[in-house]
């Protein structure tokens, strides 16, 4: 496993989530500190934060001895140490080859062994229905073969025939009629089985050990819009259409749970406000119009103690210095605990764009294609980098000084005597006069100046 961490943003909540899953599976990640060529990069501090995260997640001694590299994905190089020569990605490839264990011998391949596969991903196809993907652990699989699906606890879910068998050939997924242990395959024909379930032959009794799916933490109620202004924002307003859309989403998204709470109302549970907000926004763009309730927390009872438990969320806030106090006060009212506060570099290109009218006019002129009328989008990628904190050389910060210098140079050029004097002095600074002539000879014979 390769754990990619931004050298400027350092450890984020999703970094902790992904790493915790990997450590529970006993994996030893290769840590890659990326984007170390940014102006606000802090590679050494980021590596220390990653190590602290390993400690906080109770990694064992072998996992704590992880290998690390520093890289720039955009420039296409990686190095073992910051002082190494930056050429290409060879150090990263060599580290992967050295650390990733070789595939185990396929001793359980063939029809003489029972078929077993752990479902790792789920998706919905309009023609094939639910498609479950995983790697065959033992045995073989053929089309139209009846298989059994089991939960993690060994409870049987369903016994359907395999209607479609797909295998991966490079990045493409192609239909096949036979697959053996070690193959990555996708199976169609199941209606209930989901991620972390075991697909196997009917005679198999023990499921494959799997990590459970994290339960939802928040729920909202989506219902038909019955307000007086209904029908003005979208054309998909019927409960039947909303129901089909929500259940179609749940088929391919294991983190979404949908249930009916009443006529025209549906309870949708997810892992946070962001996931539910993305679902609602996607439906809005598709033309759906509906009413949405306030989010409510989903509590859970501890089976051992019977105590009521609430989910805990971690948040990372990037805010300007003047608003730090207000933000801390606001989240403290929600009983939040401040775990760390780190000062980032204060250079923000967008602030220069928004506050300096002259810079804004220049950038807007590039945006409008004034300097590339035949190719309006020629400079789009440059502007995107400049305004999204990828201005490594502080172009927008230096632009006012550059313009001021240009104005001084233009004023000097209009004054012939001053320009001539500056030219001579500049040449004298960067070159050497020959010892066989005096300056007056150069002035008279080369620069055609009269001796003063």
Image (tube, rainbow, N blue to C red):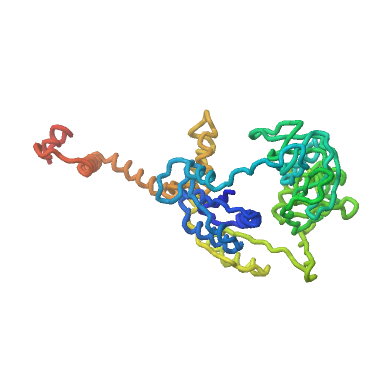
Which residue is at 81% across, 55% downward?
Answer: 221
* 382 sits to left or right of 139: left
Residue drawn at point x = 38 percent, y = 49 percent: 401
Q: Farthest residue to the right: give it.
A: 263
Q: Nearer the viewer, residue 1 or 146?
A: 146
Q: Position of residue 29 (x, y in %)?
A: 57, 52
Q: Closer to the camera, 382 or 184? A: 184
Residue 109 versus residue 344 in the image, above or below: above
Can the viewer see residue 54? yes
Q: Residue at x 78, y 64 (%)?
A: 300
Q: Is residue 127 visible?
A: no
Q: Residue furthest top?
A: 374
287 in relation to 263, above or below: above
Image coords of residue 87 (percent x, y): 43, 41
Q: Is residue 292 above or below residue 333?
A: above
Q: Position of residue 66 (x, y in %)?
A: 53, 55
Q: How many marks?
A: 0
- Quarter of the picture holding the C terminus: top left
What x and y, as percent, mark residue 338? 60, 67
* Residue beneath the point at 52% across and 28% down: 374
Residue sitting nearer the eye, 338 or 407: 338
| Side (left or right) of 3 relative to 107 | left
Please tell me which residue lies in front, 58 or 239.
58
């Amino acid at each position: 496993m390769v754990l990619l961490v931004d050298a400027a943003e350092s450890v984020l909540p999703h970094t902790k989530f992904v790493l915790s899953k990997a450590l529970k599976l006993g994996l030893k990640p290769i840590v890659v500190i990326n984007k170390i060529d940014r102006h606000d990069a802090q590679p050494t501090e980021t590596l220390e934060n990653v190590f602290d995260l390993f400690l906080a997640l109770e990694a064992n001694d072998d996992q704590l001895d992880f290998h690390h590299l520093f890289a720039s994905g955009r420039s296409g190089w990686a190095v073992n140490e910051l002082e190494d020569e930056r050429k290409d990605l060879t150090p990263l490839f060599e580290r992967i080859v050295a650390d990733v264990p070789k595939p185990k011998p396929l001793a359980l391949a063939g029809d003489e062994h029972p078929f077993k596969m752990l479902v790792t991903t789920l998706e919905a196809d309009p023609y094939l229905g639910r498609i479950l993907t995983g790697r065959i652990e033992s045995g073989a699989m053929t089309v139209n073969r009846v298989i059994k699906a089991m939960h993690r606890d060994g409870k049987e879910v369903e016994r359907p025939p395999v209607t479609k068998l797909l295998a991966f050939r490079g990045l493409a997924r192609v239909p096949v009629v036979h697959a053996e242990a070690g193959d990555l395959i996708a199976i169609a024909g199941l209606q209930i089985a989901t991620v972390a379930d075991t697909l196997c032959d009917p005679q198999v009794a023990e499921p494959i050990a799997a990590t459970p799916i994290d339960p939802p933490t928040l729920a909202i109620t989506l219902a038909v819009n019955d307000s007086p202004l209904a029908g003005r924002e979208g054309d998909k307003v019927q409960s039947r259409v909303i129901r089909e859309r929500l259940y179609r989403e749940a088929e391919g998204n294991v983190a979404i749970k949908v249930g009916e709470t009443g006529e025209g109302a549906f309870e949708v549970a997810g892992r946070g406000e962001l996931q539910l907000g993305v679902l609602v926004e996607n439906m809005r763009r598709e033309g759906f119009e509906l009413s949405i309730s306030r989010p409510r927390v989903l509590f859970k009872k501890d089976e051992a103690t019977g105590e009521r438990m609430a989910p805990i969320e971690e948040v990372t806030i990037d805010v300007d210095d003047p608003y730090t106090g207000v933000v801390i006060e606001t989240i403290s009212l929600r009983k939040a605990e401040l775990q760390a506060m780190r000062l980032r570099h204060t250079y923000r290109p967008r602030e220069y764009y928004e506050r300096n009218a002259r810079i804004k006019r220049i950038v807007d002129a590039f945006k409008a294609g004034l300097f590339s009328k035949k190719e309006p989008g020629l400079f789009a990628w440059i502007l995107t980098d400049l305004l999204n904190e990828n201005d490594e050389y502080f172009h927008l910060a230096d632009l006012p000084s550059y313009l001021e210098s240009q104005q001084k140079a233009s004023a000097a050029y209009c004054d012939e005597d001053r320009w001539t004097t500056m030219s001579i002095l500049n040449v004298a600074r960067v070159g050497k006069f020959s010892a066989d002539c005096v300056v007056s000879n150069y002035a008279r014979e080369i620069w055609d100046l009269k001796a003063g």
